[in-house]
Amino acid sequence: MTTREAILEKLGFPLDRLPKPAALYETVVLTGDLAFVSGCLPIDGPDGALLRGKLGKDLTVEEGQKAAALAAANVLRALARKLGSLDAVVRIVKLGGYVSSAEGFTDQHLVVNGASELMVEVLGEAGRHSRAAVGVFELPLGAAVEVEAIAEVRRP
Amino acid sequence: MTTREAILEKLGFPLDRLPKPAALYETVVLTGDLAFVSGCLPIDGPDGALLRGKLGKDLTVEEGQKAAALAAANVLRALARKLGSLDAVVRIVKLGGYVSSAEGFTDQHLVVNGASELMVEVLGEAGRHSRAAVGVFELPLGAAVEVEAIAEVRRP
Amino acid sequence: MTTREAILEKLGFPLDRLPKPAALYETVVLTGDLAFVSGCLPIDGPDGALLRGKLGKDLTVEEGQKAAALAAANVLRALARKLGSLDAVVRIVKLGGYVSSAEGFTDQHLVVNGASELMVEVLGEAGRHSRAAVGVFELPLGAAVEVEAIAEVRRP
C-alpha cells in the first residue's frame, strides 16, 4: 500500500469498498494522459447504504460535506483500481460537484469542499484542482451529492 | 456507409437528420485527439419536433430513454459530420446526461441508459464510456433531456 | 496589453478584476495543451457584488446575458493571469453554462449566449466553442449563472 492509500484508509475509506456502477457505464475511462471518472455517489462499498436527501431540507452542510467526501473517496478508489495504484495519479485536474438542493440553499461551494479537502489530504499538491459546484433538483436514487472527476495520470 | 452508420440508421436514426445548433455555438470542437460535442437535444432533424417535458410528471422512464437515445443519436450524427465517418471515433470517453426532473424523480440513471445503450449498440466496445447523470430543473426550450459527450477520435 | 486584452477592457471588463475563488479550488489547472477553468460566477473584482437571482423570476433574459458575459469575462481574466497573456489561448474548446432557473424558464440557451458572444468578440474564431447550457435549481451564494470552460492553450 502506498502512502496515499494509507492516508485514504486512515481517513475512514478502505480502498476495497468501491461500489458497483448504478447503470450502464464504466467507472473510469482512460484517454491519452487523462482519466475520466464517472459521477460517483456517496455509497460505502458494494453493499453500502446510499446517503440520500436534499441539502437545505434533509441534511446540514456538515452532513453534505461528509457525503461529498465519501463520493470523492469513491473517485479515488476507482482511480486506484483502474491504475493499480494511487501513485499513478499525477494531478486531479477537475472536479464536478452536483448537490441535491432544496429551494433557497446556496452553500453548494461549502458542501463540495468536503470532496476538495479529501483530495488535498490524500494527494497533497497533486490533489489541488479546478472545480464547478452547482445545485441540482434531483440526483439518481435520491443521492445527496454526485462527484465526477478528470485526472492526469501515468497509464499502467 | 460504414457498418456503424448502417446500424445507427437501422435503429431509426438516419445520419443526415442532424438538427441545427439552438444558439451561438459549434456542435463539435476538436482539440488534439479529443472531440467535444455540445449538449444535444432530442430533436429529429432540422425541422423536427423537440421532445419536451419533465420526467416524473410529463414523461415515463421509457419515454425518457427514447429521448435520451435520440439526443445520443445527434451526438453520433454530429461526430459523423465533423469527422467524415463514424469509423473515426476511437472511443466515447464521457457522456453527460441532464434529465429535466419533477420533484421526487430519481431514475435519471435509467433514463440516461437510453443514451448509453445506443452508444454500445452502434460502436460496440468503443461505445463504452464514463458518465454523469443528473436531474436538472429546466432545460433549453423545455427539452426532456440533454446529452453532451467527449470522444477520442482520429482527426480527418 | 494585447489586442484581445484591449477588446476585453473596452467591453467593460478590466483585466485585473478577477475575483478570488469562493472555496477550496484553483481557478485554472493546466494539463497537456488544455486549461480547465473552474466555474466562474458573475462578480466584478475581488470586492465586487455578486449578480444574484433566478431567471424567469428575478431577472430578465437580458440581465441574465449580462451576468453570463461577466462570468465569461472572469474565465478570460483567469486564463490571462494563468498564462501571462490572452494570446496564449489557442481556442475555447468548451463552455458549460449553468443558469439558476425558476419553474417554466426555458431560455437558458439565450442567457448563455451572453457568455458565448463575449468569447467570440474578444477572441474571434478562437472563441468559437462547443457548449452545454442547463437550468439548475440553485447556485453557490445565490448566483444567477455559473460558467466553466476548457481551452486549448500554449503553456507558459
Image (cartoon, coloured by chain):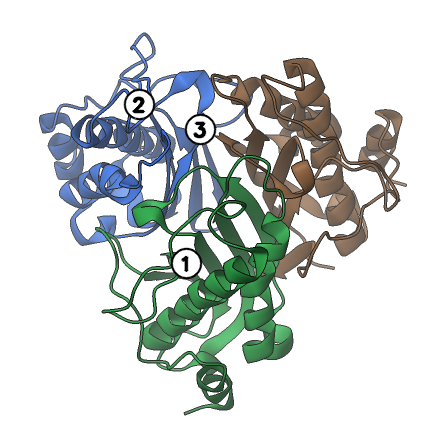
Chain colours: A brown, B green, C blue
Which residue matches tag 1? B36
Under mark 3, the amino acid is Thr
Q: Chain of mark 3?
A: C
Relative to residue C104, is residue B47 drawn left or right? left
Q: Residues within 10 Å of mark 1 (few under 14, many from 20)?
A: many
The disc placed on residue C27 is 3
Q: Residues within 10 Å of mark 3 (few under 14, many from 20)?
A: many
The image position of residue C130, as x and y in percent, is 33, 54
Under mark 1, the amino acid is Phe
Relative to residue B99, is residue A44 drawn left or right? right
Instruction: Write the residue at 30% across / 40% down.
Output: C108
Instruction: Write the residue at 11% across / 28% down.
Output: C11
Cα gap from disc 1 to disc 2, whole angstroms = 25 Å
CB of mark 2 within 8 Å of CB of mark 3? no
Residue at mark 3 shares a chain with residue at mark 1: no
Determine the secondary structure under disc 3: loop
Q: Chain of mark 1?
A: B
Relative to residue A129, is residue C128 drawn left or right? left
Residue A32, quarter of the rendered image: bottom right
